[in-house]
Amino acid sequence: MRNLIGGWLAAASLVTAFAGCNSLSHACTLVGCTDQLTVNIRRSVPSRYQVNLTIDGQSAQFTCDNGTPRGAVGVTVALCGPNSFVIVGAPSTVHVILPCGVGPDDAGVNDCGGDLKPTYIVAQPNGPDCEPTCKQATVDL
């Protein structure tokens, strides 16, 4: 009988100890995220192309060489390819110039560009009460 009462008391103390602890119901995972801007390229580009940017008033550039960003100055590029590139960060304005064409056979014969003003969404991959908080947007050029 004494063991039964002792067991009930131990269980009751554990329940009481955890009753005020909210960490079990709000456990955060460790998923990370990064502020980023994805720029979709809606026209054809050569397999190697240079992108000239003005990001929040500052000049920047990089070369996309068969899907690999190279020679980035003034910008961090997460990835690039024939259909898009991804800038690390959340700039409010971006002016872009890159070579493009109107079809697959004339990629790079014209300069295409535009002024981009992204609208960001807030991403919290671990839930609303957990870090990190990141801003992400996708725009078309």
Image: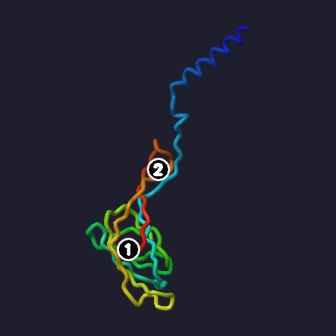
Q: Which residue is mark 1?
A: 72
Res 12 → quadrant: top right
As drawn, the label of residue 124 is 2
Q: 45 or 78: nearer the eye?
A: 45
- Position above or below: 80 against 134: below
| Number of the front mark, 1 or 2 | 2
Disc 1 element: strand
Instruction: Let me know if residue 36 appears in the view.
Output: yes
**Amino acid type shown at disc 1:** Ala
- Position above or below: 13 against 109: above
Image quarter (top left, top right, bottom left or bottom right) of the C terminus: bottom left
Q: 98 or 102: nearer the eye?
A: 102
- Position above or below: 73 against 109: above
Res 101 → quadrant: bottom left
The reply to whether callout 1 and callout 2 are in contact (CB within 8 Å) is no
- Position above or below: 16 against 5: below
Could you tell me residue 115's position as x and y percent?
32, 72
**Real-space Cα distance between discs 1 and 2?**
28 Å
Could you tell me residue 87's position as x and y percent?
41, 67
Q: Residue at x 47, y 70 (%)?
A: 79
Q: Residue at x 52, y 43 (%)?
A: 28
Could you tell me residue 124's position as x and y percent?
47, 50
